[in-house]
Every structure is written in structure tokens, then in C-alpha cells.
Image (tube, rainbow, N blue to C red):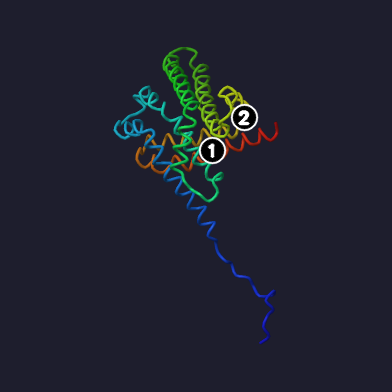
Amino acid sequence: MREQPASEQPRRWAGPGFETFGSVFGFIYTFLAGNVLLAAANAPLVLCLALVADPAAAWPFFLALTVTVAPSLAGIFAAFRSLNDDGGAVKPVAAFLRGYQRSFRQAAPLGVGAVAVLMFLGVDLVIVQAMPAAAVLVPLIVVAAVVTVSLTVTAIAGVVLLPEAGLKSILKASVYLAVQRWYLSVAMLILLGIIVSAAVLQPVLGVALAPAPLLFVVWSNASYSFHTALHSA
């Protein structure tokens, strides 16, 4: 039989290359390490969630414990950023600790402020439920709480992306992005709701599996919003 020229012979799929496996491993390693680091950075919160049967009944106590979440978010966002910035070197632990340390001075006040606002809104929500105007006031309080969470998380992402910018400028940019790209804010809140639900219902499995992959989506959306705004400015 006549042999086909090399150019006419069917090509075989070479399969995924080493770089593909390395990239997948980098994401998996970052997610696993990120969950462990988040649990360690918020150890009091995680421990109390595992021990208390009904966290909702003691919501002020648990809300106060979330004051440690903001700096740890900055740390995990820094680890996600290093996946692109550091090329093939995947060092999520070092990136998390470096991001935690660098962003603490800006992320910690954001966390304290958000907890204070949410505490105030939570107390108001309990009070107004017995008032005749509850049908109007309750939705307003819920919206204010949702906006507070969205702005805080977006601002923390901005702190990691723009370490040289002032906190006031980042907050202004976060307000603008939250309004302009409201659909990304809604997606963020849904993902954060899933994380909170998983942590409350199954503290061990929820903290071990859920946060990092979902927070990566939150980070990607926030990073996209900030980069788009900077390019258009």
C-alpha cells in the first residue's frame, strides 16, 4: 500500500502537557493551603462554630469574632494574585503570610468598621421587628447590611491590588465599582452566603473545602472590575 505523506497522516492528540498539570496542581495546592490558612487565621471563630450548637442564637458573639476575617481575606487574595504574578512558582503559604502582613494596616480597620456597622444594624433589626413600620425598615436594614459586606470585600481586594493607594481612595473606587458592576456584587454575596452556610452547618467540612475555591471567584471578579476601571480611567 502507498504510504501517506507525513503532512497527510492524521495527527494524534498529544494530551495535556506538563504546564497544564502544573497549573492545575498550583490551583489545587493553593486552594487546600488557603483553606488551612484561613482556618488558622480565624481559629477562634472556627472553634466556636464547631462547639456551639446554635450560632444564630448567639449572633452578636459570632459577629464580633469575624473581626479577624478581613486580614485573612487579604492574605488569601494575595495568594490568588501570586498564581499569576509569580509565574510557575506556587508558594501560597508565603504569599498568604506576606499579603496578610502587608495589608493588615488597611484590611484590619475595614474589618473592624464592617463588624461595627453590622452589629449596629443587627441590633436595629431586632428592635424594629416589633414596630408598625417593620415592613419598611427591615428591608432597608437588610440592604444596608448587604452593601456593607459587598463594599468591605471589594475594598479588601483593592487593598491587595493597589497596595500604594490610600484607604480613602480605595473605598471611593469600591463604591463606584459596586454600583457600576452590581451584578458582580450580587454574585459575590451569593458566594459569600454559600461559604457562611457551609461553615455554620458543617464547620469542619465547610471550612476545609468551601472557602478558597469560592473566594477565588470573588477575587477574580473584583480583580477584573479594578483592572477594567484602571484601563478606562
Residue type, mark 1 in image:
Trp
Q: Position of residue 78 (x, y in %)?
A: 50, 38
Question: In the figure, is residue 58 to the left or right of 193?
Answer: left
- Residue 3, disc: none
Q: Nearer the viewer, residue 124 or 33?
A: 33
Question: In the figure, is residue 125 to the left or right of 180?
Answer: left
> In terms of image quadrants, where is residue 225?
top right
Q: Tell me if label 1 and label 2 are in contact, CB under 8 Å.
A: no
> In terms of image quadrants, where is residue 64?
top left
Dot 1, how many residues are within 10 Å of its Cα: few (below 14), some (14-19), or many (20+)? many
Q: Earlier in the sequence, mark 1 or mark 2?
A: 2
Q: Nearer the viewer, residue 213 or 21?
A: 21
Give the residue at x 43% y 19%.
119
Question: In the figure, is residue 51 to the left or right of 196?
Answer: left
Q: Position of residue 41 (x, y in %)?
A: 39, 34
Q: Label 1: which residue?
A: 219
Residue type, mark 2 in image:
Leu
- Residue 177, disc: 2
Give the residue at x 68% y 80%.
4
